[in-house]
Image (cartoon, helix red, strand yellow):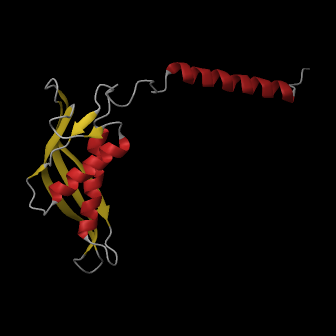
């Protein structure tokens, strides 16, 4: 009768874990050494987005949020249209507010959502080639109104989320 030695089982399980880890590394796991952003692009012009919404100064806030996201989260620099490698332009199509839930025994909103929808195009100014184009692209922000909270707070959060999502679209396709 042969007894399994605890040390032998430990060595065997460590070996099995090492083999599993090697298999995961060899299979790729979705990682790439390619850069996230196009290295041939250094500058982006962002003209003020047009707006079909009647929200006051929304196009200014959205364009500012786009520029900040590009500067902080990408290797690209903001430039004027004459000197830029690329141009990111678009239109704010709509800003929709929806009441998701109401307060018990009243019709006051308990939870509401703001959705911003944009069309945008990122074009190479040197060649005229469209790098990215999205229609009816949107993001939302949900708010639960508390004391001193306003719908404009949710609207600004939706502006920032939509701008960040647009900048995410500037990453290189793998």
Residue 131 percent across, percent down from the top left: 21, 29
Residue 157 percent across, percent down from the top left: 29, 59
Does the image show residue 134?
no
Report the residue at 79% width, 28% height from top: 10
Residue 20, placed above or below residue 167: above
In the image, 142 versus 87, the foreground residue is: 87
Q: Quadrant of the N terminus?
A: top right
Residue 25 percent across, percent down from the top left: 56, 23
Within the image, what quadrant is residue 54 found in? bottom left
Within the image, what quadrant is residue 72 found in? top left
Does the image show residue 51?
yes
Report the residue at 26% width, 35% height from top: 43
Report the residue at 15% width, 23% height from top: 127
Report the residue at 14% width, 48% height from top: 49
Residue 98, placed above or below residue 94: below
Residue 37, placed above or below residue 119: above
Q: Quick one: which residue is furthest to the bottom in this view?
A: 105
Q: How many labels does the image show?
A: 0
Residue 3 percent across, percent down from the top left: 89, 24
Could you tell whether 53 is left or right of 153 in the image?
Answer: left
Q: Quick one: which residue is furthest to the front in this view?
A: 83
Could you tell whether 59 is left or right of 150 in the image?
Answer: left
Q: Quadrant of the C terminus?
A: top left
In the image, 71 versus 107, the foreground residue is: 71
């Amino acid at each position: 009768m042969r007894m399994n030695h605890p040390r032998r089982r430990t060595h065997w399980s460590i070996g099995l874990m090492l083999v599993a880890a090697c298999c995961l590394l060899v299979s790729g796991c979705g990682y790439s050494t390619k850069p996230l952003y196009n290295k041939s692009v250094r500058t982006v012009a962002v003209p003020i987005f047009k707006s079909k919404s009647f929200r006051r100064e929304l196009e200014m806030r959205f364009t500012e949020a786009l520029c900040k996201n590009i500067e902080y989260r990408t290797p690209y620099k903001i430039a004027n249209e004459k000197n830029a490698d690329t141009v990111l332009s678009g239109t704010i199509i709509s800003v929709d507010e929806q009441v998701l839930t109401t307060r018990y025994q009243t019709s006051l909103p308990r939870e509401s959502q703001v959705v911003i929808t944009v069309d945008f195009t990122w074009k190479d100014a040197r060649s005229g080639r469209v790098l990215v184009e999205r229609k009816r692209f949107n993001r939302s922000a949900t708010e639960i109104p508390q004391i001193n909270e306003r719908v404009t707070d949710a609207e600004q959060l939706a502006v920032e989320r939509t701008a960040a999502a647009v900048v995410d679209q500037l990453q290189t396709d793998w």
